[in-house]
Amino acid sequence: MTTAFAAPAPAVASAVAVADADADFAAITADAHTNTFHPGAFDWSLARTPEELAFLSRLCFEEPGHEEASIAYLTKELAQLAEIERHVAAVMALVLAELQADDSPLNRGDDLHYALSCFAAEETQHANTFYRYVRTLSGHDLKLGDNLFAERFALYQGPQSPWVKLAALCCSAYVGESVITVFERRTELMDPRHARFFTDLLYKHGLDEARHIKVDHLVMNVVIPGFSDADKAAMRELLDATENYNRELAARFSASVIGEFGFDYTAGNVAHEIQMQLTQMFAAHSHGEDGVYRSVDDGLDPRARLLIKEFTDAEAVHA
Ligand SMILES: [Fe+2]
Ligand SMILES: [Fe+2]
């Protein structure tokens, strides 16, 4: 089995980086116990009022009149997100269990354990929240039994080190976390006083996601650079396999929702088009073919930056 930070002992610079990382993990999660929301914190009676549905239509199609298509689109995307979040939580728990057999410096004490435990618990609550949201919004008790969970979980039950699994998991989650951050900014721009349920939903979800993104950045900056070439190759393989399954999952959710609603919700759907563009750009940029995993804000090309600026009025995604 390979491990990050394997012998020979890392140089002093690496030890300093590990000490900094411990402090950063602690800082990221210092307020995690109060700065988070469970589904019980929302007023669900506001989730599909006429004003809310008109807002969703403007968010997705830039005009009212497309309420049903907006409902179908958000149902598909957020039901799929809940399924992916459930998987992230489960794999994170597996990683935490496997780290019990690892004595790397970064794994000493409780800072990393605490940060990853919060991450897993929060993703479970996000799945819980979005599960309820899509049912409340759509009125459909949409379930996808054929969700490939066993296959997606089995990917992470191999002999790779838990650090490799953590890195693949964080980098796969990072793209979606970055895309939904852009949409959170979009709702904030359209509804700065948070009058709408969906704005509030993305804002409260985003409080947790801002911490996850910082954890992802630490994994990119501190864990992955300590990998051997074999670790990097194993991570890439896991990441690619995870993304392949997620694409298959997306196709299944799409077919399921189109079957349930009886029409295609993507025609003329501006939000869907921008989501697809951002997903492709963020994946290509942050999972560098040069072997470097980086923040979506780190050297993003001007075309992507312009799209983000026009959509959210923000100069950056995470900064
Ligand atoms: Fe989440
Ligand atoms: Fe997350």
Image (cartoon, helix red, strand yellow):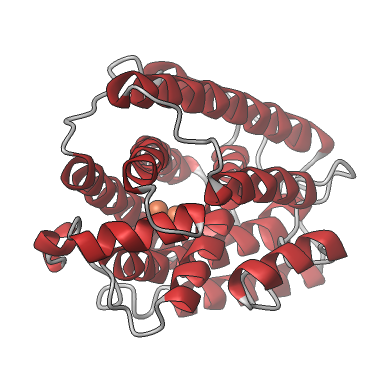
Name, please, the residue furthest toward the front: 65
Left or right: 264 with respect to 127? Answer: right
Q: Is residue 153 visible?
A: no
Residue drawn 36% across the image and 35% down it = 83
Q: Is residue 55 left or right of residue 168?
A: left
* Residue 116, x across and y down, in percent: 42, 56
Nearer the observer, 77 or 99? 77
- Residue 134 position in % (x across, y down): 25, 43
Of 33 and 106, the residue lying toward us: 33
| 164 lies above or below 247 | below
| Quadrant where the image shows the N terminus | top right
For the point 61% across and 71% down, the residue is 318
Quadrant assignment for the C terminus: bottom right
Q: Is residue 170 left or right of residue 114?
A: right
Q: Name the outermost residue toward the bottom.
A: 193
Q: Quadrant of residue 22?
A: bottom right
Residue drawn where x is 71% and y is 75% of the image: 16
**Number of residue marks:** 0
Residue 3, can we see it?
yes
Image location of residue 117, percent across then percent down: 35, 56
Residue shown at 73%/67% (left/top)? 297
Instruction: Say if 214 sits above or below 94 in the image.
Output: below
- Residue 106 in picture, x, y percent from top left: 57, 61
Foreground pick, 170 / 59: 59
